[in-house]
């Protein structure tokens, strides 16, 4: 009798694995099972070793604020996100490589000093501390007979060392992974080389699980042709368990918005309840999909990434519309900031002024620091009077149009283009302004129902499966992304394609670039392929 420790990368995956293991061996064995993420297991381990006094773990928000303070203190000119990436990369390694510049190093040191002075750790420190203490003999390894690591291709160096330390101490280690689904090289995942290193270090036996039970035979066939173009991968043949063919389509549209229209039409025309996933390389493309689906009143869930209505121009538009509805100041203040008014001035006025929005705007005109601000405030005040009047007469579309036209003057061209689409989507919806806003921001009861349509990035789709999958934005430069390693991008496309059980659509837009080279590699859209290429004007959806 012994204990099994199963390790995953997310809490959801840990729950899923726990229920699968217990379903197979019976609840009676629950006490012999520990399932968790690398970090939760390390935290529990350190907590036991320190006699119940856990290290104080920094929440993600605290970590970012602390890093930001150090970044500001050192007056780094490097963008904050780049600096965080560099520090995260250093902390995912056992022996950090030198930093690219002295400021990065200084910010890192300041951050670690602050952590130490507060007796706190971040997630990366937690596992590193565990590894260092086990390696130095201060902490015994977990007393487990078996260790199972799921998605092991995603391990970074510190995670791999933690596994190796257990393996060397006598735990029987099983890594389950697919080198073709290694998507996190940018987060220091070791991918195939990590799997190879563990195999060598622990003299492990490699077993290939070649059968794919999910995808229709032709979908898997095209995916296998694509991934065969990667040089750095385990030699293996992937075999379809299913003999039947699914439906595959390759679509070329003039521009992104017509591509989105195709997606929306296809979803609306497919039989009720068909499960769809719309996948894209970037959240920007998903924004366009989201606008299209919202305007067509298709219920959907967007996983990861912010809703298009809740960031950038979307949130400014919705905020201002809310101010029209309830006379609240926040939407006005955010709109002023978007239009270029200084944050300090807005905050001062927000604290000082009282009353409804029109009165507060009126007072603001008196204190305006320059002519441009005065003109903006007067325009917004006039607008608010008109929009509130129209809103009281239930002329929702007119209000949307007026507010969008006001904001358009302060937009960059890409923002203006998105704003026009957001405006179009809100105008297309029926109902009062409040109902339309509730629908697009998902606060209506309809928006909370579990939908059949999911939209997400290709990264977020890993581990999931859907009846029908549509990959939008298959252009060279988008997928593969111009700034990324081609083999990484090919794996992303492979993961996306293999999420489809029965139907796969890949589409691209002429305006955005030539079709992705991956379509050619996957032999999609060629005359001899089973996939059909359709121009949008003659594309009919056949269920
Ligand atoms: N032995 C089997 N017989 C029939 N169906 C199976 C079998 N094993 C798995 N499946 C089905 O195949 C699909 C994929 O299974 P699972 O999610 O376990 O695969 P996976 O290897 O994790 O896939 P991926 O890594 O591509 O996400 C699921 O729908 C599952 O129910």
Image (cartoon, grey):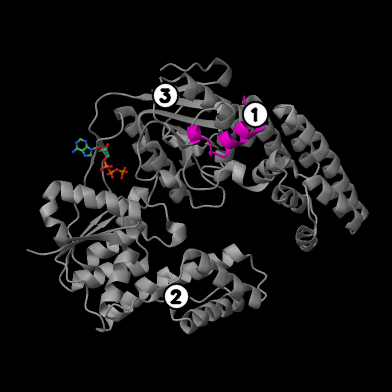
Please report whichever mark, 1 or 2, sits nearer to the chain's N-terminal start. 2
Write the residue at 34% across / 55% down.
Answer: 11
**Coordinates of residue 55 in the picture (x, y in percent):** 37, 77
Q: Most extreme residue toward the right, as rendered? A: 371
Measure the C-alpha gap from mark 1 to mark 2.
Answer: 57 Å
Residue 540, can we see it? yes
Quadrant location, the N terminus: bottom left
Apparent side of residue 148 relative to residue 215 in the rendered image (left or right): left
**Coordinates of residue 160 in the picture (x, y in percent):** 31, 66
- Which mark, by number, is residue 432? 1
Q: Which residues are magenta?
A: 430-447
Task: Name the residue carrying label 3.
Answer: 531
- Which mark, by number, is residue 125? none
Write down the quadrant of residue 524 in the picture: top left
Write the residue at 44% across / 81% down.
Answer: 119
Please report whichever mark, 2 or 3, sits nearer to the chain's N-terminal start. 2
């Amino acid at each position: 009798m012994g204990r099994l420790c199963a390790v995953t990368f997310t809490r959801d995956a840990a729950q899923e694995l726990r229920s699968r293991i217990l379903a197979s061996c019976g609840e009676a064995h629950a006490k012999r099972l520990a399932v968790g993420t690398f970090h939760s297991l390390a935290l529990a381990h350190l907590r036991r070793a320190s006699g119940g006094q856990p290290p104080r773990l920094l929440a993600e928000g605290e970590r970012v604020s602390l890093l930001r303070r150090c970044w500001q203190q050192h007056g780094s000119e490097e963008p904050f996100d780049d600096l965080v990436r560099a520090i995260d990369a250093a902390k995912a390694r056992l022996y950090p490589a030198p930093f690219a510049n002295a400021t990065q190093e200084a910010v890192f040191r300041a951050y670690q000093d602050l952590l130490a002075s507060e007796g706190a750790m971040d997630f990366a420190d937690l596992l590193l501390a565990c590894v260092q203490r086990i390696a130095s003999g201060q902490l015994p390894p977990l007393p487990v007979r078996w260790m199972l690591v799921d998605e092991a291709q995603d391990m970074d160096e510190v995670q791999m060392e933690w596994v190796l330390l257990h393996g060397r101490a006598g735990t029987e280690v099983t890594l389950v992974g697919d080198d073709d689904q290694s998507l996190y090289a940018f987060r220091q995942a070791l991918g195939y080389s990590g799997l190879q290193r563990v195999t060598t270090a622990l003299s492990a036996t490699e077993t290939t699980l070649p059968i794919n039970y999910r995808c229709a035979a032709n979908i898997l066939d095209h995916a296998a042709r694509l991934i065969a173009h990667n040089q750095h991968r385990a030699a293996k043949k992937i075999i379809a368990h299913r003999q039947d063919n699914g439906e595959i389509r390759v679509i070329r549209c003039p521009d992104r918005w017509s591509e989105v229209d195709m997606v929306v039409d296809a979803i609306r025309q497919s039989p009720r309840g068909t499960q769809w996933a719309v996948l894209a390389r970037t959240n920007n493309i998903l924004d366009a999909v989201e606008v299209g689906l919202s305007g067509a009143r298709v219920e959907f869930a967007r996983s990861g990434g912010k809703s298009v209505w809740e960031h950038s121009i979307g949130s400014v538009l919705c905020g201002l519309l809310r101010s029209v509805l309830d006379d609240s100041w926040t939407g006005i203040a955010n709109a002023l900031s978007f239009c270029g008014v200084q944050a300090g001035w807005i905050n001062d006025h927000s604290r000082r002024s009282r009353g409804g929005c029109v009165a507060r705007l009126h007072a603001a005109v008196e204190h305006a620091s320059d002519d441009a601000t005065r003109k903006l405030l007067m325009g917004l005040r006039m607008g608010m009077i008109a929009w509130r009047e129209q809103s009281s007469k239930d002329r929702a579309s007119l209000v949307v149009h007026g507010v969008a036209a006001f904001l358009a003057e302060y937009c960059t061209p890409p923002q203006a283009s998105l704003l026009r689409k957001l405006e179009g989507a809100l105008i297309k919806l029926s109902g009062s302004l409040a109902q339309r806003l509730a629908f697009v921001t998902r606060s209506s009861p309809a928006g909370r129902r579990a939908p059949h349509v999911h939209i997400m990035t290709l990264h977020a789709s890993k581990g999931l499966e859907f009846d029908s999958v549509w990959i939008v934005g298959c252009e060279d430069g988008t997928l593969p992304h111009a700034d990324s390693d081609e083999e990484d991008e090919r794996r992303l496309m492979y993961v996306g394609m293999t999420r489809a059980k029965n139907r796969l659509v890949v589409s691209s837009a002429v305006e955005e670039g030539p079709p992705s080279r991956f379509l050619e590699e996957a032999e999609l859209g060629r005359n001899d392929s089973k996939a059909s290429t359709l121009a949008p004007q003659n594309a009919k959806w056949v269920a």
